[in-house]
Image (cartoon, rainbow, N blue to C red):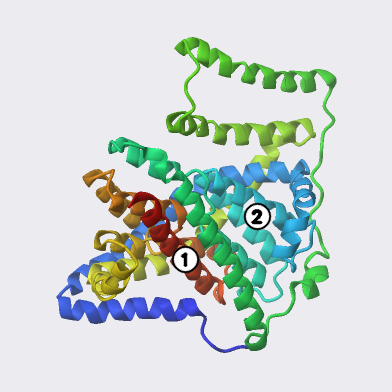
Amino acid sequence: MDKKPAVINIIWLYLILSSIVVAAYTGRMDEITKASFDSAKSAVTLAISLIGAMALWLGIMKVAEAAGLMKTISRAIRPVMVRLFPDVPADHPAMSAMIMNMAANMLGLGNAATPMGIKAMTELDKLNPEKGTATNSMCLFLAINTSSVTILPLGVIAVRAAAGAASPANILIPSIIATALSTTTAIIAAKLMAARSKESIAVQSVSVVQTENEAAPEAAPELVKLGLFPKLFAISLIPVFLFAVPWHFYKIGHVPAIDYQLVVSATGWLMPLLMGGLLLLGYLKGVKVYEAVTDGAKEGFQVAVRIIPFMVAIFVAIGMFRASGALDLFTWIVNPVTSLIGMPPEALPMALLRPLSGTGAFGVMSEIINQDPNSFTSYLVSVIQGSTETSFYVLAVYFGAVGIRKTRHALPAALCADAVGILGSVLICNIMFR
């Protein structure tokens, strides 16, 4: 067995130690002490706030699974997924859970994407031959998630619109291109690192233990047979709902032009539609939807408790690093290099914060946009925000949910994706907005 510490151990330790050393010179010892307690409290508060969303969507995922939707999706996307995740059986529930997570991320449905991602990671862990150690499939799935596969960066567009940007949605195409670059990098990096790790890390193939882990499969859910009238009544709700669209146009007196405001407004329908569609499908398939939702929701609290230690560790290290002035020092050191590639100094803190702190990066972006929403720097930070993800947070939540402590190459692959996403954002923005 490999005895080398995982990369996350080294990074976490040096974040703490460098914070203490820098604080000794900057005189911010009190600040990092306060930051350590505040960050620990924030981690627990955030984990508790996730319980509701996780309970709801893990319950809805249970309905989808009982209705057979997961197996249907697995069969539909088998040609692509078996190449990306060769260690996972083609018809395994993990395949469809990963697809649903990626689809939710693409549409900007973060509240649904996180529980779906945790569900996928839980399914992947069922195939894990060495509990506590990430498999190649887990590393790749996490790297893809941290590359932020997003088609509609609605949060960023909303901030730009509120600040009075001339064209709030102009960042859409650059964000998609940058996201494609970071996602491609995540896949390539994870695959290359996995191939290399076979020589240095003795991790068994998932297929070796597949039979053992699936020897006692879960009992199939009990389905009920619906009568004709309940089915017709449920199906009749679909045309009634669809009629709401022309009714809405009738009320406002015209058909609105297709622009970013219409897109933002329409995406507000996605979450209820997804929820209602999955529940209706389950009902028509004979699933006891209420029982299935409450049964699946029980996992929400358990998952939140499991991820608290991982989130506390990550949040404390990042909070101390920022409070000590170490981030400012690092920004000053790398600024001459980033200036050569066309990145304004004002955008550098945002780029460095993005993998570490989602709220911190969003705050920096909002401040820059509010100062001048039509400036080049404003466009750049908007694209960076829309095409990258908070890698350390994703790692803490997804791996924490299944007790993964040895992350192997997941974090290096994710950071490679972040770096390419940021560099790609700079290049694209220089081409399109200079």
Q: Residue 38, position in %: x, y? A: 29, 61
Q: Amino acid at mark 1?
A: Val
Which callout, 1 or 2, points at the residue further toward the start of the chain?
A: 2
- Name the outermost residue toward the left: 27
Q: Quadrant of the N terminus?
A: bottom right
Along the line of sight, the residue nearer the viewer: 253 or 342:
342
Relative to 166, 246 lies left or right: right
Dot 1, crowdedness within 10 Å: few (<14), some or many (≥20)?
A: many
Element marked by disc 1: helix
Q: What's the residue at 69%, 64% (across, down)?
A: 84
Residue 401 visible: no
What element does badge 2 sit on?
helix
| Residue 26 locus on image (x, y percent) | 16, 76
Cα separation, mark 1 vs mark 2, equals: 23 Å
Which residue matches tag 1? 420
**Residue 241 vertical placement versus 194 (above, below):** above
Q: Quadrant of residue 392?
A: bottom left
Mark nearer the viewer, 1 or 2: 1
Q: Which kind of residue does numbered mark 2 sit on? A: Met
Per the image, the residue denoted by label 2 is 98
Q: Give left or right: position of 418 versus 290.
A: left
Residue drawn at (21%, 46%) of the image? 371
